[in-house]
Image (spheres, rainbow, N blue to C red):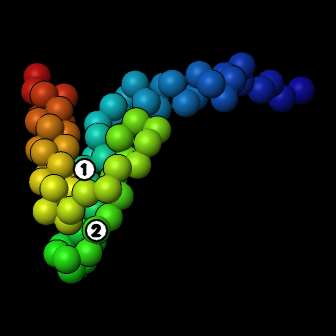
Amino acid sequence: MATKSASSPTSVVSNSIATNPDRDVIKQIRSHEVAIEELRNISSSRALYQKNGNIFFRTTVHKATAFEQRELDTTKTKLQKLNLP
């Protein structure tokens, strides 16, 4: 009779996160890079809304781009800290 492994789906998920913690950080970096490129393609005279908590606030393209750039920089710093021995 064949035996099945006793690993539950939650333990498999937690093991994959523990073995590759910078995977989510890399996804965040890519997300910020895409957001910056999309914001660069919007005309500067156009207003847009940026989410802050659960509320959206009207802002300019320049301010939204600056915010995404700061988030990208902090996420890259986080990735560098994870890769240090």
Residue 52 x, y percent position in the rendering: 35, 41
Q: Secondary structure at mark 2?
A: loop
Q: Which residue is mark 2?
A: 47
Pinpoint residue 66: horizontal percent, then vertical percent. 12, 54
Q: Which residue is mark 1?
A: 29
Toward which corner of the image does residue 17 lie, by quadrant?
A: top left
The kind of residue on which mark 2 rests is Ala
The quarter in which the C terminus is drawn is top left
Q: Nearer the viewer, residue 72 or 8?
A: 72
Instruction: Return the residue found at the far right.
Output: 1
Residue 84's label in the rendered image is: none
Above or below 4: residue 26:
below
Binning the other alpha carbons within 10 Å of mark 2 as few (below 14), some (14 to 19) or many (20 upward) gives: few
Q: Secondary structure at mark 1?
A: helix
In-image side of 1 versus 60 (left or right): right
44 in relation to 58, above or below: below
**Horizontal relation, residue 1 to residue 10: left or right:** right
Q: Is residue 23 visible?
A: no
Number of the front mark, 2 or 1: 2
Question: Which residue type carries mark 1?
Answer: Ile
User: Closer to the camera, 55 or 33?
Assistant: 55
The residue depicted at 20 percent of the width and 52 percent of the height is 68
Give the vertical position of 85 relative to 62 (above or below): above
